[in-house]
Image: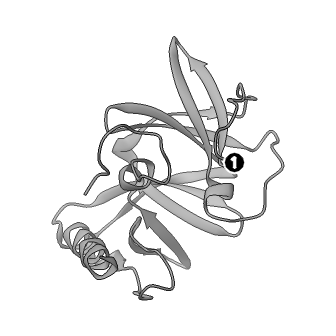
Amino acid sequence: MMLQQNTKTASAASAIAASEQANEFLTFRLGAEEYGIEILKVQEIRGWEQPTTIANSPDFIKGVINLRGTIVPIVDMRIKFGLDEADYNALTVVIILNVANRVVGMVVDAVSDVITLSGEQIRPAPQFGTVLDMQHIVGLGTVENRMLILLDIEKLMCSTDMALMDGSPVQ
């Protein structure tokens, strides 16, 4: 099963890299690392506001907010990725995503910028066998001296361990 997932991840990175047109990514920071997600999945970027806590939810789900009449679950990506818990301050940002016809927010340390990557700037993620789950990482992007971890945010948010979406996970 893991080999099949690694093959799918590698083929997704190859598809992005082989694309003739440039790909735009919103970049953000979690701790010392910089990540990128496809800009077309981003609905808006908001400052941090304390969400309403939901009883018995996983630790990485901080709660929900009311966004113009839509109830939006807020996921703390630091907790989801096993990083130290962050202090929520004026720089903390919530990226509102539209994935699988659902609105979801994710808390990140800071948003950096929107960058355009050509196919040759995107490399497949390294394979670590069963030691590390890489199914949500599309590849690694390089811009000057920066290395970006490119996430398949829809696959991540739709994964069964997130428990945010109904139905089967995105393939």
Q: Which residue is mark 1?
A: 59
Count of all numbered marks drawn on residues in the image:
1
Neighbor class of circle 1 (other Cα within 10 Å; few <14, some 14-19, many 20+) is few
Instruction: Please say if 105 is above or below 82.
Output: above
Instruction: Please say if 135 is above or below 164.
Output: below
Name the quadrant of the C terminus.
Answer: bottom left
- Callout 1 secondary element: loop
Q: Residue at x 69, y 48 (%)?
A: 59
Instruction: Please say if 45 is above or below 34.
Output: above
Q: Who is closer to the viewer here, 103 or 140? A: 103
Q: Who is closer to the viewer here, 77 or 111? A: 77
Q: Quadrant of residue 156?
A: bottom left
Q: Position of residue 96 (x, y in %)?
A: 51, 35
Q: Quadrant of residue 16?
A: bottom left
Q: Position of residue 90 (x, y in %)?
A: 80, 39
> Which amino acid does the dot numbered 1 rest on?
Asp
Taking 55 as reference, is 133 left or right? left
Taking 145 as reference, is 58 left or right? right
